[in-house]
């Protein structure tokens, strides 16, 4: 009797150790989220995505010429909108970040103000992910300030995973903020065959784990990125992988997180 209990306990522990919580899904439906970054800034690919029928998630940069226009256009056509928060990378020019970026030299108070202003500037934003940021995502104080502000506004976080040492996962976990991480970049090489190859990787991850998250871009690689994604959809249908808004992948976490409306 005692031995049976121990075996059951061990089996249970082993089972949970094997199933990463973010990839755990009760349903058999395989799902993939495709986040497209740099709306608001980029032009190429915008029309294709926002008038297209692939359920992408639209990540909009704040305070750029087309930020509000793109966010509203996306929302009106049924796409989920998130804030694409510009953050300082290890390499690159500050001018790539656009207005009011999160940089290493800022106080926690200033970071919180910039994040709050950025969140409030993007209509319909339900989450945020980072634009670049390989330098500041490693800074625990800055990341804590960002996550606190996301919590204040009840936004979930998608770690774009621009650094393997990102503090987002541990800080979000500590503060109880829903977070998922990007699995695949689609257009690090701007060619349709490359994007299609990366889409196959996304499909494989979704098949193996139940869910996968990819990030592509409008702008310089926007035409190739949109073409590569659209041309991959037959394969996703054949494999029975549904492309969903990214919040769909964390809906259980989000249910506990949001305060019910009164
Ligand atoms: Zn970006």
Image: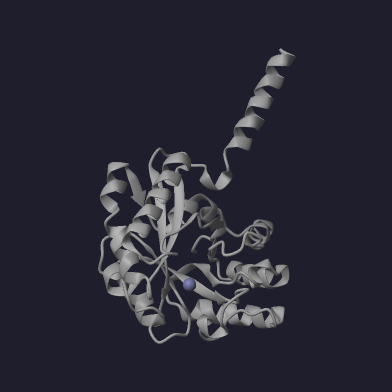
User: Residue 160: x percent and y percent?
Assistant: 53, 63
User: Residue 224: x percent and y percent?
Assistant: 32, 66
Evaluate whether residue 54 shows in this view.
Answer: no
Work out whether residue 134 or residue 256 is closer to the camera in this orientation and state it.
134
Along the horizontal axis of the image, is 94 left or right of 243? right
Q: Quadrant of residue 244?
A: bottom left
Q: Is residue 172 above or below residue 94?
A: above
Residue, x 38% and y 41% (percent of image)?
29
In the image, farthest residue toward the top: 1
Q: Quadrant of residue 111?
A: bottom right
Q: Is residue 25 above or below residue 119?
A: above
Q: Quadrant of the N terminus?
A: top right
Q: Quadrant of residue 125?
A: bottom left
Evaluate whether residue 206 shows in this view.
Answer: yes
Work out whether residue 41 or residue 62 is closer to the camera in this orientation and state it.
41
Q: Is residue 168 above or below residue 251?
A: below
User: Residue 161: x percent and y percent?
Assistant: 56, 61
Residue, x 59% and y 36% (percent of image)?
18
Along the horizontal axis of the image, is 199 left or right of 177? left
Residue, x 45% and y 47% (percent of image)?
211
Along the horizontal axis of the image, is 259 left or right of 234? right
Work out whether residue 80 or residue 36 is closer to the camera in this orientation and state it.
36
User: Residue 26: x percent and y percent?
Assistant: 47, 39
Residue, x 63% and y 62% (percent of image)?
168
In the rendered view, how is the structure colored?
one colour
Q: Is residue 186 above or below residue 77?
A: above
């Amino acid at each position: 009797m005692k031995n049976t209990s121990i075996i059951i306990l061990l089996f249970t522990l082993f089972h949970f150790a094997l199933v990463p919580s973010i990839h755990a899904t009760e349903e058999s439906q395989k799902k993939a989220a495709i986040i497209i970054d740099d709306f608001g800034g980029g032009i190429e690919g915008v029309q294709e995505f926002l008038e297209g029928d692939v359920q992408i998630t639209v990540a909009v940069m704040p305070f750029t010429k087309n930020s509000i226009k793109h966010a509203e256009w996306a929302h009106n056509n049924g796409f989920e909108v998130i804030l694409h928060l510009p953050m300082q990378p290890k390499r690159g020019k500050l001018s790539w970040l656009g207005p009011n970026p999160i940089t290493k030299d800022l106080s926690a108070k200033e970071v919180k103000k910039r994040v709050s202003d950025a969140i409030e500037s993007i209509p319909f934003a339900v989450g945020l992910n980072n634009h670049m940021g390989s330098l500041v995502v490693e800074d625990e104080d800055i990341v804590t300030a960002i996550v606190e502000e996301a919590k204040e506004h009840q936004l979930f976080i998608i770690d774009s995973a621009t650094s393997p040492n990102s503090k987002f996962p541990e800080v979000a976990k500590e503060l109880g903020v829903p977070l998922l991480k990007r699995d695949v970049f689609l257009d690090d090489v701007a060619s349709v065959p490359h994007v299609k190859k990366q889409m196959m990787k996304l499909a494989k991850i979704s098949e193996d784990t139940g869910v996968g998250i990819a990030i592509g871009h409008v702008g310089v690689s926007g035409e190739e990125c949109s073409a590569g994604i659209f041309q991959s959809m037959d394969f996703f249908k054949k494999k029975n992988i549904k492309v969903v808004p990214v919040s769909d992948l964390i809906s259980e976490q989000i249910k506990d997180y949001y305060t019910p409306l009164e």
